Image (cartoon, coloured by chain):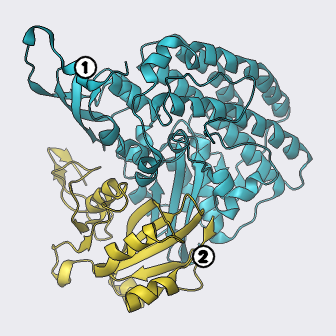
Chain colours: A cyan, B yellow
Amino acid sequence: MASKTDDQRIIEFDVRTDEMLVNMGPQHPSTHGVLRLVLRTDGEIVSQVEPHIGYLHRCAEKIGENLTPRQWIPYTDRMDYLAGMNMNLGWSLTVEKLLEHQIPDKARHLRVVIVELNRIASHLVGMGAYGLDLGTFSPFLYAFREREKILDLFEDVCGARLTYSYITPGGATADLPPGWLQQCEQFLDQFEPVIQEYHALLTTNSIFIKRTTGIGVISRDLAISYGCTGPVLRGSGVEHDLRFNGEEIYTEMYDGYIFEVVCEKDGQYPADEDYPDVPPEAVLGDCWHRFYVRMLEVVQSVKLVRQAMQRYSTASGDYGVPIKFNLKLPKGEVYLETESPRGQMGFFLVSDGSAIPWRARARSSCFCNLSITAEICQNCLIADIPAIVGSLDIVMGEIDR
Amino acid sequence: MVEQSFTEQLQSQFGDAVRDGDPDAIDRWIEVDTDRLAEVCEVLRDAENIQLDMLNRFTAVDYLHTDPKKAEKADWEPHMELVYHLSSIRFKHTLVLKVMIDRWNNGREGELPVVPSVTGIWRTADWHEREVFDLSGVEFSGHPNLRRILCPEDWEGYPLRKDYELPKEYHGIRGR
């Protein structure tokens, strides 16, 4: 429904509309949790959007000042609860950076397997829920069918299906169970062809294209200025992925892996015959592009998992021994960002030399991604609001912390 | 990401207002005087060879020991640090910037310290500054909409300050 607002204002029969304040949320199903948007509307047209957040604030940072780093791991799970493994990894690497702790090769590849699988699961929810936002129910079921299998794999690894606390400072809490790699391989073999189904259901669906192209356009400069990261930044054509451009302690995890940063370069996405074409009405930086970047990232993640499993089975060392619960941290402060499915997730750790951090801070990617809504939702239709907010793929747990 | 220090370049323009931080730190930082902050930030974003166009993170750290025994042993006076983490999309380098401020404006307890806002330089600073205002109690002059963001608007106190105490009661809900 990407029509010019000028056209919308031409009202038949000269009926006048009044300005109205509309509350959307915090219990609205398409706001992905407890987000409240206050819309100033004139008929169907939204002139101003004000997001109100904080309904899920659980004082995670204050709690972090009272727990040791390993004890805080479960709290990181509950921030971005759709990508718990990636959050665990972010905090673990931050602590390891402060300790200058090297983990064995095997643990490194194990982490890549787990983290990239979680990225697939997370993008699947992003895709399915986006379909729900736009009023189609079936993609959600298709997405959850496959996600279920990833959750089963994770359950075998750590016993939990959502809040894993699996990756910890020093390595992981356990090794992969016997036979797990074969199961994972089977899943990938079955999953790869299914991606085409998703493209048929949403990416190339003409209703979907009509609903998502040309709205919520974020230009390159706007995305950078608002600190947008992850698929939202790459959907605007910025080639930036911390798996390539991050700090050494993070990029060395991906050393020697073959994969690509998914974003539009010189007007083209990385060529692959299996990828559907970009529809002519799509504008770089609109909702469709953000969705498309996520779908292509899933393919890259599948490639990464395959390579990581290969390397894991031949690597030396073990899965890494977790650090002691009450290990005294060296004095200092470190900051580290990792590429989580929703963007750059950063953790900041200040230590005064005791076992408990002086300050534990989580930089949320969705927090920055969401802050742009007020800017891009101006003068759009009420029906486009769920489409725009959904395309940012936010998780309120991470925003409110 | 390459860590960079542009201290010399900045010092030629701002003199002593820009200083190098602890040289042994894992993430090295530069320290900037409060009143020159906005100008320094603008140079950092716009200078041809720096182009730090993204504000990744902005936070405040409160340095205060509530236990008098520990306060005696501490090697710092009570203060607050504002930490800005900047990065450049084009050059892929990063920089950490720090501003040291008093915990209270002019030492008058209850009066929040004031720091110039950088909202005009990086738009993302808008919400980050609101969060720091909300949780750590720092005011930003020139901020367009400085309200609490995570806590309810009628909340009292600044939770991430070390001397914060949970209220006894909030709208009929027991606090502690």
Taking the spot 17% from the left edge, 49% from the top edge, the residue there is B170
Q: Secondary structure at mark 2?
A: loop
Residue A116 screen position, x and y as percent: 69, 39
Residue A55 in view of the camera: no
List x then y, in percent, for residue B153: 18, 50
Quadrant where the N terminus of chain B sits is bottom right
Res B122 → quadrant: bottom left
Please determine whether, in this image, residue A146 is positioned above or below residue B55. above
Closest to the observer: B8 or B167?
A: B8
Where on the picture, by quarter, is residue A280? top right
Q: State which mark lies toward you, 1 or 2.
A: 1
Query: Is residue A152 rendered to the left or right of residue A71?
Result: right
What's the amino acid at mark 2?
Ile
Q: In which quarter of the view is residue A113 placed?
A: top right
A63, A240: nearer the viewer: A240
Q: Specify whether residue B62 is in view.
A: yes
**Label 2 lies in what chain?**
B
Tell me what residue is drawn at x 26 percent, y 50 percent. Answer: B151
Above or below residue B61? Residue A12 is above
Horizontally, is B61 left or right of A255 in the view? left
Q: Which chain letter matches label 1?
A: A
Q: Residue A38's spot in the image, x, y percent?
A: 22, 34
Q: Amino acid at mark 1?
A: Asp
Pointer 1: residues within 10 angstroms few (<14), some, or many (20+)?
few
Residue A7 - label: 1
- Taking the spot 65% from the left edge, 45% from the top edge, the residue there is A166
Q: Which mark is residue B26?
A: 2
Circle 1: element type: helix
Vertically, is A83 above or below B158?
above
Crowding near pointer 2: few (<14 within 10 Å), some, many (20+)? some
Q: Please state which of residues A364 and A296 is positioned toward the viewer in this rendering.
A: A296
Query: Which residue lies at the image location 14% right of the left edge and 45% below the top edge?
Result: B171
